[in-house]
Amino acid sequence: MKRALPGVLAGAVTLALPAFLDDSALAVYIFLGLAAMVTVGVSLLMGYAGQVSLGQGAFYAVGAYTAGLLTVQGGPPLAGLLAAPVAAAAFALVVGVPLLRLRGHHLAFATLATQLILLSLAGQLEFTGGDIGLQGIPQFSAGSFEVGGAAGYAYLTWAGLALVMLVTRNVIASRAGRGLRALATSETAAASSGVPVGRYKLAVFSLSAAFAGLAGGIYAFYVGYVAPGSFPVLLSVEYIVMAVVGGLGTVWGAVAGAAVITLLVQVLNVVGTLPGMPSYAPGVLSYAVYALVLIVVVLFLPRGLVPSVAGRLPARRGRSRPRAARPDPDLRT
Amino acid sequence: MLRIDGVSRSFGGVYAVRDVSLGVAEGEAHGVIGPNGAGKSTLFNLITGHLAAERGTISFDGVRVDRMPPHRRAALGVSIVFQGARVFHGMTVRENVMVGAHSRTRAGFAAAALRLPRHRREEREIAERADRELARVGLTEWAGHPAGSLPFGRQRAMQLARALCAGPRLLLLDEPASGLRAGEREALAVLVEELRATGLTIMLIEHDVAFVARLVDRVTVLDLGRIIAQGTPERIRSEPAVVSAYLGEST
Ligand SMILES: Nc1ncnc2c1ncn2[C@@H]1O[C@H](COP(=O)(O)OP(=O)(O)O)[C@@H](O)[C@H]1O
Ligand SMILES: [Mg+2]
């Protein structure tokens, strides 16, 4: 019961908050939740399974475009939302077969390239609306229930996040999760224990893509349009920064990291647009903050916010829970 | 049970294992000795599938396995304890051992995500099994500790428990006693004897000839990737080729 307490508390605050927020604050709240959803996937992929992706923005985009394409012509929004994670996972499965043969920074660059290719394709192709993108995506609705205001999207987003967190937690603590954590340290030793390493890497890559796709789907309905410009490469970098800041390989760390970075960027935007600030101030400040936060965390809290704080609480010490793997290079093939 | 026929493997044009043929019968304990770099670990890697043979065939229980990926050979019952510590970091000792049961269990991502009853039952079974193997190697009180925090000797014991958790039919031990203290070596020897008594087929790489001689039925001696002698421990010790290539050098 004690273990569930932080979760219950977080749930209560999550449910209560939208009632107190105005529309612009709700927008931040929604984007925070969407970022957290993607970041939980990044944490699962990088922190537990030891695979790098600088292309989560691509899966976010696939989800958003899927939801948009299915609904601008009058398709049911529920189908669009359900198809978003499925399409993103399927896309990850297809690109993952060649990409996951790569490791470390090779894999990072290849996933980054995937996003660049995808964006330029979306900008060229007719059915995705080219550079202008898809306009007039309807509000989300399921049956007779329609999500109108921002508060509705806030609930949808945080319900999605809760689902993503639950799935991640369940997977990590399972046979499949142990297989993932094992292959993060030694693919050789994992394989000789019977873990199908290639298939597992593909599965976790697709699962993290599904999380990003779901977030992208909700994003499309909330914002109402999608265009290549909505998914800059910086987005993918941002997810990694969030995951690292919060603590790789912790589910709550991903949420904490997303919250810290999103709120910080907001504050800096406010500061950057104060009267008397030069016009480039907001841009410079937000880039500077990623760099600065990342450096500070890596230097002073190398395990990230959540593990560092949790480690200081005496009650939590000694309790073993699934943690991030520390990959060490295989000495032999 | 295991049949290796004319197997070769080279690295950069130099043979690590050259035209090796050997058979291991069910229930046999088979020692593999030879000087450093003789190709012993490479031979094990060829059996487990971490290295592909360039020539020759390997069959296990009459099934050709030389083109199978390692995880499928593991599923057939081939388990290995690698040379050196191979610890899965960020996991407890018990979880490390539970990974060993991977090939004898089924629940996948979907069953885990949905917490299906079948999955829970299986998790319980795996944990119980892991605890049994941990008890067998004397690590019960370490079960909840982070695996990375174990002293070296205990990490080796944990790996053995992991291999046993798979319920192997063929157990490969690559220098399991190296780096162990005298007491730990003795405990290991007793355990290997116990496993042998249960009828498990074992292959054992070891430097210490006296240690091997006590534990195995037959010995294969490798030098520069080739088999230079094969037979009972007693015969091997008096073989002139072995004495000059190996025993003479190491003492
Ligand atoms: N992955 C590898 N890449 C290149 N050379 C290797 C590799 N594995 C083993 N070798 C070489 O093969 C030979 C046999 O090595 P090994 O099988 O580890 O010997 P042993 O276990 O008998 O000490 C050595 O010369 C070693 O350098
Ligand atoms: Mg060796």
Image (cartoon, grey):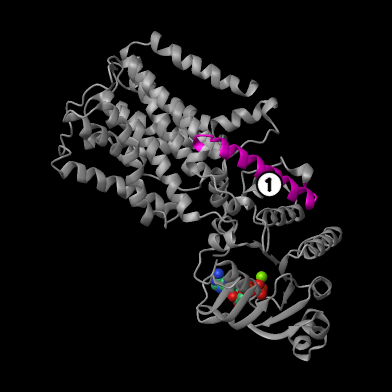
- Residue A242 in magenta stretch: no
SS category of the residue bearing label 1: helix
Instruction: Answer with the quadrant where ligand 1 appears in the image.
Output: bottom right
Q: Main secondary structure of the magenta part?
A: helix
- Residue A246 horizontal/vertical position (percent): 50, 32
Task: Inspect the image, locate mark 1, and give the three-letter code of the amino acid beneath it.
Answer: Ala
Task: Tell me which segment is drawn in magenta.
Answer: B113-139
Direction from residue B230 to residue A325 in the image, left or right: left
**Quarter where residue B22 is shown:** bottom right
Farthest residue, direction left: A126
A111 on left or right of A14: left
Quadrant for the C terminus of chain B in the image: bottom right
Vertical arrangement, residue A99 with respect to residue A175, above or below? below
Count residues near mark 1 (Cα–Cα under 10 Å), then give few for <14, some for 14-19, many for 20+. Answer: many
Query: Most extreme residue toward the top, as rendered?
Result: A20
Residue at 71%, 41% (x, y): give it: B145
Rendered position, A147 above or below B204: above
Disc 1 chain ID? B
Name the residue rendered at 52%, 39% in the picture.
B112
Question: Residue at horizontal 54%, vertical 81%?
Answer: B14
Q: Quadrant of the N terminus of chain B?
A: bottom right
* Image x and y of residue A174, in percent: 57, 41
Depth check, front residue: A185 or B116: B116
| Magenta run includes residue B128 | yes
Using the rendered image of the protein, determine whether residue A333 is visible from the camera's viewpoint. yes
Indicate left or right for B189 with A203 as reference: right
Q: Does B194 appear above or below A211?
A: below
Residue A13 placement (x, y as % from top left):
48, 14
* Residue at which label 1 appears: B147
Residue A83 x/y as whole percent: 30, 35
Q: Residue at x 25, y 24 (%)?
A: A223
Q: Nearer the viewer, residue B219 or A38?
A: B219
